[in-house]
Amino acid sequence: MGVGYRFPRARVLVFAKAPVAGACKTRLIPALGADGAADLHRALLEDTLARLAPAGIAPIELWCAPDAGHPVFRELAARWAVSLHTQQGDDLGARLRHAATNALAQAEAVVLIGCDCPGLGSAQVTSALTALLESSPQDAVLGPADDGGYVLLGLRQAARELFADMPWGGDQVAAVTRERMAGLGWRWRELASLPDLDRPEDLIWYRRKRAS
């Protein structure tokens, strides 16, 4: 499977919910309606894989919720040759850690991303894996979001401290992640901050980006 990849010893883990009305992008429902929010989520997922898969950076794993059975997941897996996996865990931190642990059983580094950041592409993922695996390897790579979260987390080990009791959904996720990496004695590299698409006000710049 690693033939042709720049980083065959790594994995890129993409997290996504099934594009079901009322079950995804719920904070955008007031602006778009349930169907519109689900359609946007599907488009963001498709765009994310279209940016990453052809670049041949590393094998891609699509981690699906509530399971991998939705037709969109199966269609994308066939189109882009990504593997499908079911998210497991009671909260986001548990799901992220389970996926990272699973992937690191067969890889030396992982990059965890969602599909809510249209500005995140092959350049950022390549930079993260270069920092993790090439000269003077880092323990982690953090890609902050403009709202205080993060859009990318690159790891060589799935330390529990980075996932347990985190203020998910708030504006302190990146700051707390930095504190905990420092507490672990890790070295990490940070990428440039990027906007992500979570709230109705984020639709303004997203529509401008799509129109440009």
Image: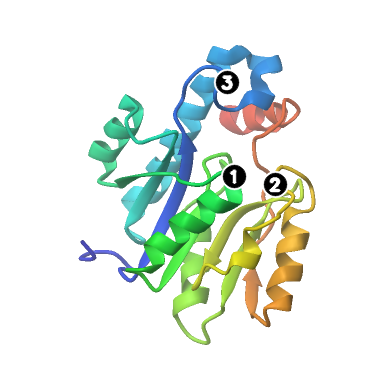
> Which residue occupies 53% across, 24% down?
40
Name the residue furthest front: 90
Q: Quick one: label 3, few (<14), some, or many (20+) residues within 10 Å?
A: many
From the image, state whether disc 1 or disc 2 is nearer to you. Answer: 1
Do tag 1 and tag 3 residues touch (Cβ < 8 Å)? Answer: no
Q: CA distance from mark 1 to mark 2?
A: 9 Å
The correct choice, above or below, for 39 with respect to 192 in the image is: above
Residue picked out by circle 3: 37
The amino acid on which the numbered mark 3 sits, given as a three-letter code, is Ala
> Which residue occupies 28% across, 33% down?
74
* Left/right of residue 207 with respect to residue 3 in the rendered view: right
Mark toward the start of the polypeptide (2 vs 3): 3
> What is the quadrant of residue 208 in the picture?
top right
The amino acid on which the numbered mark 1 sits, given as a three-letter code, is Asp
Seen from the viewer's position, the closer of residues 191 and 176 is: 176
User: Looking at the image, can residue 123 be seen?
Assistant: no
What element does badge 2 sit on?
Answer: loop
List x then y, in percent, for residue 41. 52, 28
> What is the quadrant of residue 160 in the picture?
bottom right
Do tag 1 and tag 2 residues touch (Cβ < 8 Å)? Answer: yes
Q: CA distance from mark 1 to mark 3?
A: 22 Å
Q: Quick one: label 2, few (<14), some, or many (20+) residues within 10 Å?
A: some
From the image, state whether disc 2 or disc 3 is nearer to you. Answer: 2
* Left/right of residue 94 with respect to residue 168 in the rendered view: left
Seen from the viewer's position, the closer of residues 86 and 17 is: 86
Residue picked out by circle 2: 168
Q: Quadrant of the C terminus?
A: top right
List x then y, in percent, for residue 163. 62, 58
Residue picked out by circle 1: 91
List x then y, in percent, for residue 190. 66, 67
Q: Quadrant of the N terminus?
A: bottom left
